[in-house]
Image (spheres, rainbow, N blue to C red):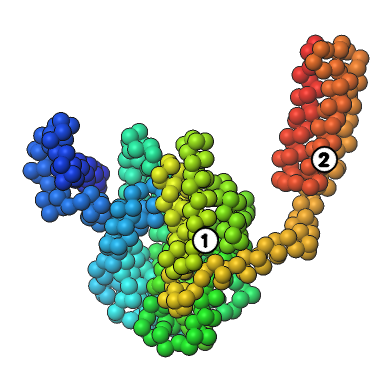
Amino acid sequence: MSRAFVTTTQFLALLIGGGIAYINAQSAAGKGWRLHVIFLRLFLFFPWLFLDKAIVNQPFPVQFRVRLEGLGPTYIKLGQILSLREDLLPRSITEELSAHLLDRLPAMPTERYLQLVEEQLGQPLETAYRWIDPKPLGSASLAQTHRARLITHEKVVIKLLKPGVRELIITDTRLMRLFSMFLQVFFSRYQPRRIVNEFANYTLREVDLRFEADNAEVFAGNFKDRPEIRFPKIYRRVSTRDMLTMEYFRGLKPDAPSVALLTREERDRVTDLGISALIQMIFQDGFFHADLHPGNLIIFPDGTVGFIDLGMVGRFERDMRKRVFYYFYSLVGGDPENAARYLISLTYARSAEDMELFRRAVSELYGRWLRSSGFQEFSLAQVILQSIMLAGRYHISYPSEIILMVKAMVTVEGVANILAPDLNLADSARPQVRRLLFNQFNPINLLKDSALVVPEMLEIINRSPLILSEGLKKLESSLSEKPPSRRLSGSSAAILGGFSILAGAVVVAFEGPWPVWAGLFAFAAILTLRKQPQ
């Protein structure tokens, strides 16, 4: 109950502060004398007396960020997600959250950390670890990490969830869902209910470290044939829901000063690996790192690349992955019209008119990008980001996975530009995207995909005599019992029904998903036969 009170108080303070920020903006524009502004000033004067003046007199984006920080870890994570939603929120808010949102929190004392690790192990530390560094590697809103060495000599990192964080997040997400129902009534344009639900799903997975362990192993499996791209090994026997022990990666961060000592060939190799890894994650596997930043990328001395901090991932189902791939292929291939068309297929729109206006704006944006010679100022990732920002103007929104994908692309492009300032991401990605396209339509791969549906096709063939028998019975019944109709005779209906069954069989042979199409066509045939006028 106390958490609900604190959250409600901060929420109301933010609303009042927003009203005061509006009054200040109107006054600065010379409109402070308007009747509604005067009325609002009088209405907010009394509550203003009880608010922290150092916060409430700031611009609204600053107030918003400070209130999120004051509410703790859950809302800090929410701010990180909202900083990406330029399709929904004003840029002033997303920029404030991106630039100034606090996520480096004070570390818990070493003694307390070691005590919690021992509790998670259920046995003395000495039975599992030879050494744990008393100095933390990092202390974020959710967890704290320390270097260590296992009893079997492997160098590892221990990531431990901070005490009470899970319970706090569960409570906060419940309250958020209640608030989002209220906000949905007044701010439906920003889709607060959908944003909160997506955020809750992601964050609740982040506070169960077993999901991060699973993610690391999935990535390692996806890249098992590419040893030059590495993911940390997970030590399950010393990992729990609240604690994760994983391989320690010793290398350079892309923004470290010592990276400048690498040769041009080494930097080009690292850049190519990073871009190709991201392309495979997004367009081939449909499973990608959704929290990429320079701190989560490691450059090893041998020129290989590693990815860490895998708690937040994006997933694309098969249909979504194909549409995203065709969008990206059209874009790097210089086809703005098709790129806009595929992008629109990924969006949510309030009306068809908004969708058409958005399509035209995006096509024009892509056309200007293709005619631009300065890719540093108008790069591939930036043009995709600008198309996301355009969406808010036309009341268009994207699934959260699309936003996470764009963030990953912008990050990789930014890192690549640190290593190779003259890089053109579109040129670097084009050969790899074409290779994926040819691989997708490789006859061997098509045969493999077809083999997966052979059991379903055999089952349909096995059942087809029964379906045809029922069709013939309906045909005989129609010929003997039903008089001709002005709309459709019994024989014509039976023929149409048979054609529907035959068309269903053709679709089954060449399209998918097989059972659904077969059922629909068979059902249509039966309805056609049964619903004739008596």
Mark 2 crowd level (few <14, some 14–19, many ≥20, 10 Å Cα): many
Identify whether 147 is placed above or below 487: below
Residue sitting nearer the eye, 42 or 243: 42
Name the residue carrying label 2: 505
Residue 12: % across, % down: 21, 42
Report the residue at 52% width, 45% height from top.
359
> Marks 1 and 2, Cα distance to the nearest angstrom?
48 Å
Identify whether 15 is placed above or below 492: below
Left or right of 394 on screen, residue 106: left
Q: Are marks 1 and 2 in contact (CB under 8 Å)?
A: no
Residue sitting nearer the eye, 311 or 60: 60
Name the residue carrying label 1: 371
Q: Report whether residue 386 is seen.
A: yes
Report the residue at 16% width, 46% height from top.
28
Residue sitting nearer the eye, 256 or 508: 256
Report the residue at 59% width, 79% height from top.
227
- The amino acid pointed to by label 2 is Ala
Q: Quadrant of residue 164?
A: bottom left
Report the residue at 53% width, 55% height from top.
367
Which mark is in front, 1 or 2? 1
